[in-house]
Amino acid sequence: MNEEIKSDQWPHEWLDDLGNAEAERIQRVNQYPDVEPTPENAQAFIQAREEQITDYLIDKYVK
C-alpha cells in the first residue's frame, strides 16, 4: 500500500483494505491489542498496546 495514502488513514481504514491473512499478520507483528484502532478508542488502544509490548519485553528480557 502506498505509504502516503496509508499515513492519511486510521489503522482500521487501511487494514480493512487488506486481505484477512495480511491484516492478521500486521496486527500480530505490530503487537495490536484486542481493542479496535478507531479514533474513539485511540487512548484505550494505545494504553493496551503499550501494556502488551511491555509484557512481551519483560517476558523476553527479564524473566
Image (cartoon, grey):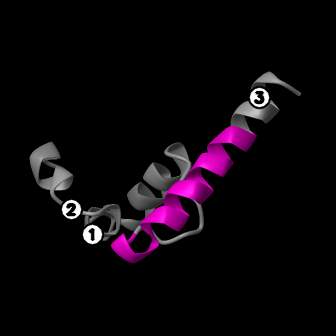
Crowd rating for badge 3 (residues with CA inside 10 Å; few <14, some 14–19, many 20+): few
Residue at image coords 41%, 60%: 23
Tell me if 58 is positioned left or right of 18 in this view: right
Residue 14 against residue 49 in the figure, above or below:
below
Please tell me the numbered disc located at residue 9: 2
Crowd rating for badge 1 (residues with CA inside 10 Å; few <14, some 14–19, many 20+): few
Instruction: Check contact, mark 2 vs mark 1: CB within 8 A.
Output: yes
Looking at the figure, which quarter contains the C terminus? top right
The residue beneath circle 3 is 60
Please tell me the numbered disc located at residue 22: none
Bounds of the magenta segment? 38-55
Q: Nearer the viewer, residue 40 or 61?
A: 40
Residue at image coords 54%, 66%: 44
Residue at image coords 40%, 56%: 22
Which residue type does callout 2 highlight? Gln
Q: Nearer the viewer, residue 3 or 40?
A: 40
Tell me if 43 is positioned left or right of 61 in this view: left
N-terminal-most mark, 3 or 2: 2
Which residue type does callout 1 highlight? Glu
Residue 54 lies in the magenta-colored region: yes
Instruction: Check contact, mark 3 vs mark 2: CB within 8 A.
Output: no
Residue 17 lies in the magenta-colored region: no
Disc 2/disc 1 C-alpha distance (Å): 6 Å
The residue beneath circle 1 is 13
What percent of the width, then of the height, locates residue 3?
A: 16, 44
Q: Nearer the viewer, residue 3 or 23?
A: 3
Disc 3/disc 2 C-alpha distance (Å): 32 Å
